[in-house]
Amino acid sequence: MQKNPPQKQLLLPLSSRLITVVIFFASGICLAETSLLNDQLTVLVIVLVYCLILITYKYKPKGNCFIFYCLLGILFLLLGFYHAERHLKPPADPNHIYNLVGQQQSASLDGILQKYPPVINTSSGPETKLLMQVKAIYQPSGQNPQMPRRTKASGLALLTLKGLLPADLKPGSRFLVKTNVSRVNTYSTPGSFNYKKYLANQSILIKGWIQSPNNIMELHIVESPDLAAGITGLKYLPERIRYHIADFLDKTLTQPARGLYKAILIGDRNDVPAPVLENFTGAGCIHILAISGMHMGLLALVTIASLTWLLKRSTWLLLHAPVHKIAVLIALLPLVIYALIAGFNIPVLRALLMTIVFILAILFDRPGNLINHILLAAFLILAWQPAAIFTASFHLSFSAVIAIALIYPLLYRFLFPETHTTPSRCVKPGSKAITSQSSIIHKIPETFLKWILAGVALTTAAMLGTFPLLLFHFNRFSLVAPFTNLLVEPLICFWSLIIGLVASLCIPLFPAMAKVLFATGSVGLIVAEKICAFFSLLPYASLWLPTPSPVEIILTYLFLLSSALALHMTGKQRRYSLFIALFFLCSLVAAPAVTSIAKQSSDSASVTFLDVGHGSSVLLQLPGNKNILIDGGGAESDRFNIGDRIIGPYLWNQKLRHLDAVVVTHPHADHYNGLPFILTRFRPKELWINGIPGHDKEYEELLDLASQLGIEIRITKAGNTLFQGGATRLFCIYSGQEPVYPNDNYTHYRFINPNDLSLVLRLETNSKSFLFPADISAGLAESLIREGKKLKADVLMAPHHGSPSSMSQDFIKTVAPEYIAISAGRNNRFNFPAKSFYDLQKKGIEVLSTGRDGTITFNLVNGEIMVSRYQVN
């Protein structure tokens, strides 16, 4: 059976009212992010506009709907704003856990385990994520610390346990836990993932750390009445199903099949090994491991096709019932079962809702109006979960579906143009059977080829629709995705997923059969992973590109839309649409070119202190479009690299593809552990180091990587100029290799405080100066004063992240800065910066900290310093 070519009717007719409603409702949700309109005023305006719509609709002149649509748009703009504003603002309830917890503190929480607890395997041992519905909080009492004060509480808290959860705790269990809790925060760096908003969209505003499983105690409460207990059991049934499936997979399968099965069955990717995730990402198949509308749609397709074939075996059903509609209706059951197994979380429910909209369209004989169905699904999702509009999954899901609706028919017609059959020639009697057999033999490979080309066309259409948003969210685009998806999707969605669902149903009654089925299904997962590993290692398998601006994204979609519409038209309309598409394409190409020319000719500069937690990374953007990174390190874990997650995204956000130089002030991990990613993706021409030998393994690997990439490694000496252009100069005033202490013997430098071997750099540009002393101590700072080094600067980077051991009043007095910038993480374990740094504000010095102020940028324009902050916490 081959795919039938899509028809033009799929695009039309579009409901202008539905388009108006969805666009303005979505705009209202976006407006709620920044607006501070009064709730009561908004309600009054909504009522007024609604009354005007009723009047206009009743008395409007025939054929003139402009006023009606304007009022309709305003109404749904306000409705979207009011609806989102209630979801997005912090909870007003004084007993909400968010309002009971401020800064990081120790407390005991009483609550219920809400979700299946995923386990993350790290180098220091397993960690377990617990989502608790808080019922009460026990906090130390001011009068008697030994008797904590109990406060009734509500809300969700995401807790991380060092170790494994006690076996008797399952979703729905009530427990008491001692934990360090705080409000959720994230890195305040432009371009980086906003973890705080991600959790807030799930109503999670509090996080906590549990030091040991011994800090958890199950609470056995008085049994509820049978009805209430039954309702509670049903409420937590999906999560308990996920818990038992995960437990069965842990005992049955090995990696990577175990982690991959958890991903596609219960939506838990935490157990997928990091190299396997990278293989799927590089091959453009990572979306297959996230339960989405694609999984629901393919499952529905397989179920409907199978049921239709089965029901058509009955002649009576064919004559007396709509077989296709019956199959579609029955297909809802496995979809709901899949959503149940996957946990009924927000992405799963969104995918289920989208699929149900299309199924209902078939049941009610409206299958052709595809765009309207997409709009309706979007409206229902936003009405249910307004914050979904800010998520990458929402953007990518709907852009892919819309692109398939608009672009796939064009690609299909291009690949399979309508051909006219030639008149049949005379054949000899008795050759009919031979001709029929020959045509069947030739038809099999032809049908198979059509399936392959149609699959490539489908994936290409989805890629074209999603690539601007993929770059916006991830800065990465896979060029091999059309081919890998064609191979991987059938293996996972048509083989492993179907078998896995059947095996999951067999676990309670037939565990031995479930084990065999999972082993059989895992073959598809392992083969799919091998395919992804092969394609991801090909040269240029992925492109890493700067973050597109909103204008560039809009221009891209206008170009794609006008091109698609042009190919659906004929004659003069087609020429006009192609001309418009060409205009959008030229504008898209010209925008970055104009920006690049402007940067090349600009004499302005900026210095940015990135929020990297406890670490340091400073970007210098200098005249002539020269870009230098001083250090690149910070917080790190097995699944989090500061270069990949924070520094790289910021550089792409600044439209940078390459760096001119990278400087490592000294070989401490919090100054370089993100640089391997930066060197690989941004290929600087030079790497400046202090040249002190005897470093740890990771630093030696960094230097080896630089050599492999052809990056020139230069050892910095005092007085060396790292960059000079016009009136701008970056130079070294201390390199860690020259003696500054009295009676120094630098043949024994290894016994000196390693922080005092840091490079001390000075930047002069636009009549202003910056001093970067890295991690030097107060003693070395005072030695530099005695040496008569050029220290006076307008902006000083606080030594050693604001450590009290690096605070020297004489040094501050000598530098005489107007600003002090401190690179120190929020709530860091060292309690940096020291209070003595903030006390300098009394002397008229403005003190800024990345932990408090987020990413700090000093812009130099016309000899003046302008400070901007980026803070999302």
Image (tube, rainbow, N blue to C red):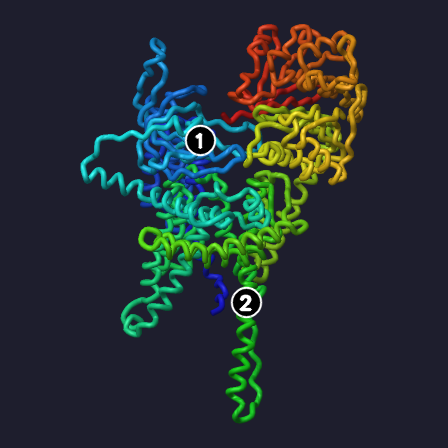
* Residue depicted at x 53% and y 86%: 434
Within-10-Å neighbours for mark 1: few <14, some 14–19, many 20+: many
Of residues 495 and 189, the one nearer the viewer is 495
Q: The residue under label 1 is which amino acid type?
A: Thr
Residue 395: x %, y % from top left = 49, 44
Residue 631: x %, y % from top left = 67, 27
* Residue depicted at x 35% and y 55%: 334
| Horizontal arrangement in the rendering, residue 763 relative to residue 397 (left or right) | right
Instruction: Tell me which corner region of the image, top left, top right, bottom left or bottom right, holds residue 745.
Output: top right
Vertical position of residue 59 compared to residue 812: above or below = below
| Horizontal arrangement in the rendering, residue 304 relative to residue 432 (left or right) | left
Instruction: Tell me which corner region of the image, top left, top right, bottom left or bottom right, holds residue 141.
Output: top left
Vertical position of residue 850 compared to residue 440: above or below = above
| Horizontal arrangement in the rendering, residue 486 relative to residue 704 (left or right) | left
Vertical position of residue 256 compared to residue 822: above or below = below
Q: Which residue is mark 1?
A: 160
Within-10-Å neighbours for mark 2: few <14, some 14–19, many 20+: some
Of residues 237 and 31, the one nearer the viewer is 237
**In front: mark 1 or mark 2?**
1
Q: The residue under label 2 is which amino acid type?
A: Lys
> SS at mark 1?
strand
